[in-house]
Image (cartoon, coloured by chain):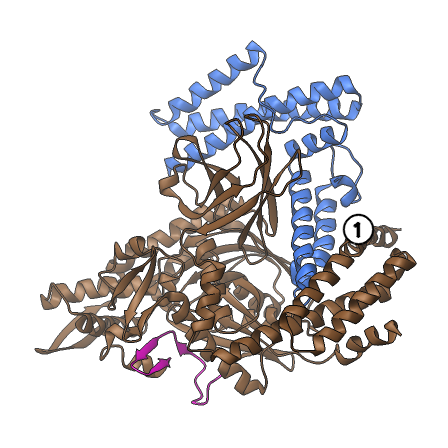
Chain colours: A blue, B brown
Amino acid sequence: MNYFQLFHLPAQFELDLTELGTRYLELQRQFHPDKHAAGSERDKLMAVQQAANINDAYHSLKQPLLRAEHLLALRGLKISNEQRSFMEPAFLMQQMELRELLAEISDAADPDALIDEADQQIQQQKKALLRQLQSALDANNPEHDHQAADIIRKLKFFFKLQQELELIEQTQD
Amino acid sequence: MALLQIAEPGQSAAPHQHKLAAGIDLGTTNSLVATVRSGEAKTLSNSAGQDMLPSVVRYTADNVIVGHAAAADAVLDPHNTIVSVKRLMGRGFAEINADAEHIPYELVDQSGLVAINTIQGIKNPVEVSAEILATLADTASQTLGGELTGVVITVPAYFDDSQRQATKDAAKLAGLNVLRLLNEPTAAALAYGLDSGQEGVVAVYDLGGGTFDISILRLKRGVFEVLATGGDSALGGDDFDHALVNWLQQQTGQSTLSHSELRQYLVTARQIKENLSATEQLDFVLPLASGEFKGQISRADFDALIQPLVRKTIRACKQVLRDAGLDTEEIQQVVLVGGSTRVPLVRSAVAEFFAAEPLTSIDPDKVVAIGAAIQANVLVGNKSDHDTLLLDVIPLSLGLETMGGLVEKIIPRNTVIPVARAQEFTTFKDGQTAMAIHVLQGERELVDACRSLARFNLTNIPAMAAGGAHIRVTFQVDADGLLSVTAQEKSTGVSASIQVKPSYGLSDDQVATMIQSSMLYAKQDMQQRLLKEQQVEAERVLEAVTAALHADASLLSPEEKLNVEQALAALDTVKRGEDTAAIKAAIEHTNHITDEFAARRMDISIRSALQGHKVDEV
C-alpha cells in the first residue's frame, strides 16, 4: 500500500505533520471500529483491519526513518529486515567512542554533564544525517536512493544510542 | 421479485428507533450501570434505590446473593462470600496464592487458573463476575423496560490480555452483547470532556479498590487520543486496607487471624480509612471474639502506612509522562477517578506532582460508568449530539519468546489500537511441519519476567528444506485491546493451523461449556439463545448488504448483483425459521458471496474519503 496516497500527500521525505495528523483523524473518524460497532461480524472485522492499516500507515509516515524506508520501498528498494552490518571504519569508530561515553556515565562524578554531552553529539549527528537523507531522497534516482539507504542504516545506530541514553537517564533519577 | 423481499428487512428495522444500551463499571469494590436517556447519561438504581452495587457475591446452598446483602454477610460467611473478585480475573493460581494472606476465602487451582471453593462447588472469577454483570443488566433492563441491545464494560487501562479476555468471557456468560471493552480512564475523560467541552492535554489518575491507572489524553474537537497509559493492575484501596490490618494486628497483638476475624479486621480497616478522609484524629472500636478493642489513630499515622503505596503511583505517573514525551507543565488538567482518590494524601500527592488542583466535579465513583454509557449509546447506533472518536493504546508490549529465554517485542506499549504487525518465521529443520510460538506481554527482556499470554502451535506447514518455509504470523490487537493471531506460509499461501492454549484464560470451548452448565441459563434457554444470536446477526447482515446494494450497486456486474440478491433472499427466508445451523450457513454463504463486493466498497470509500477532502480544500 502506498501510504502517501492513503493520506493524499506528495510522496516525498519532507512532510507537513499537521496535515498528516488532520487527514489521519479524518480517516479514523470514518473507519474506526467504533463507527461500525452495530455492523455485521464481517463488517466489524474489516473495520478492525482497515483501522489497523490506517494506524500503521500513520505510524510509518510520522517517523522520519520509517517514512524514508517506505519511500525507498515504493521506489523498489527494500531495506527493512535486512541483516547487513557492513559500515565504514570511520563511522564504526565514532560509534564505539559514543558507546564508551555512555558506559562512563554511571561511574562519573557528574553524570548529568556526560549525559548532556552525549545527547548533544547524538543530536548533532542525527540532524546532519537527516539533512543528507533529505537531499539524497529528493534527488530521486537509483544512485542516490542507495546512498539514502546507507544513511538510514547509519541513522538507526543513532536512534538506538538515543534510546539507550534515555534509559540511562531514567536510571539516574 | 427478489428485490421486494430484500427491501423488507430495511423497512422492519426502523433505523431511528432508540436502542437500549448501557455502560457498566465492573469495579473491584463497587459496580455501577448507567445509560443515556433524553441525551443525558445517568447511573441507574435498583428497586431499593441504590446505584452502587457492592461487587460482592455470596453463594449459599441453594442461592446466589449479589450486592449489599452479600456484603453484609461477609463477616458471617467469609468462605462463600467473594469480595474483590476483579483482582483474580485472568490470573494464575500460583501468582495469586503467593500473597493470599489477605484473602478470606479458599483459593483452589483450576488447571493453573485461580478459582474459589464455595458451598456450591468450585467457582472461577469469570463465573463470579458474571453474577455481578447479570445483576447490573437486570437493574438496567427493569428500569429501561426492555432487553439491552448491547453494553460497554470498562476495564482498567493497565489490564493485560488475559484480564480483558476474562472480563469479556464473564459478559458472555451473563448473556450480554459486549459492544466494547473501554479503558476506565478513557471513559472518565469522555465524561469530563463532553461535560465541560475542555480541550488540551489531561491526565486521568484512577485509583480504585484494586487497580491503579494513569493515562494521558489529548482532547481536541471530539477526539480523545490516549498518548500514554501506565499503572498497576494490583494496587488500590484494598492495599490501604491491608496496611491498616497489619497495623491493627500490631495494636491488638493478634498475629494470626481466622478467615472470619480477617473479614472483621478488613471491615474496621475500611471504616477507619473512610473516616480519616474527613477527620484528623479517630477513636475506633474493633469487635473481637474476646471483646472490643478500642484504639486511636491519627491521619498522620495512616499517611505513614500508605506513603509507600502512594509513592508507587507517583512513580508510574513519571513514567507515563516520559512515555508521552511531555513535562508536567504541559498537563492542563488532572482528573481524579475512583473511590480511593478521596484519601487526602492521594489528593495532595497528585496535586503536588502535577502542580494542578485536581478536577473532581463529577463523582469519582460514577464518572467511569457515565463515560461508558455515553460510548455505549454511540456504539449501539443511537443518534448522538457528539461526533466523538476514541483512540486508545495497548498498555503493555506484546512479544515473542526467542532463543535463550529472551523476549522480542512485536508491538510496543502505547501503540494505538487497532494494530496489526506481522513477523516472519522460518523452519530450521528439513521437512519441519510444525512450530511452537510463545506469546508474552510485558516490558522486561526475560521470558520469566513477562506474563505468558498463550502458546500457539503451528501445524500443517508444507514440508520443505530447512529455511525454505516462510511463515508469516500476524498479531492483531482489536479496539478492545484483545490479541488474535493468524499464520500463513508465504510461498505456498497455505494457512497454517493454529491451536491456541491461553496461559491464564479459558478456551472458547470451556466458555461454551460454562455457559451451557450455568445456573444463569436453563438448558432450553440455551438453544433459544443461540438461535436468537444467529437471527440478530442475520438481521445485521441483511441490513448492511441491503444498504450497500442501495448505495453501490454500480460496483457489481448484473450477474454478481443477482447472486447477491439471491443470497439475501435465501437468508431472509431461513432467518424466519428456527434452524440455527441453517441460518448460520446462510450468513456464511452471504458473506462469501459479498466478500469481493465489500472489499471494492472499502476501497472506494477510502478513495472518496480523500477525494472529499480534496474537494473541501479547493
Image quarter where the N terminus of chain B lies is: bottom right
Residue B145 vertical position relative to residue A170 in the rendered view, above or below: below
Residue B102: where, in percent of width, then height?
Answer: 24, 63
Above or below residue B370? Residue B555 is above
Q: Label 1: how many residues lie within 10 Å, few (<14), some (14-19) or many (20+)?
A: few
The residue lying at 74 percent from left, 33 percent from top is A14
Picture coordinates of residue B373, whole percent (x, y): 57, 73
In the displayed structure image, the side of residue B282 where residue A29 appears, left or right: right
Query: Residue at position x 89%, y 51% from top?
Result: B618
Instruction: Tell me the magenta residue range.
Output: B44-67
Residue plotted at (68% across, 47% down): A53
Does any portion of residue B120 appear in the rendered image? Answer: yes
Residue at the disc numbered 1: B603
- Residue closer to the observer: A93 or B576: B576
Relative depth, front residue between B356 and B275? B275
Quarter of image, res A90: top right
Q: Is residue B443 above or below residue B337?
A: above
Note whether B359 is above or below B215 in the view shown. Answer: below
Q: Secondary structure at mark 1?
A: helix
Q: Amino acid at mark 1?
A: Asp
The quadrant holding residue B514 is bottom left
Residue B55 magenta-highlighted: yes
Q: Residue at x 58, y 24 (%)?
A: A124
B132 within the magenta span: no
Q: Judge left or right: residue B113 versus residue A141.
A: left
**B300 left or right of B10 in image:** left
Q: Chain of mark 1?
A: B
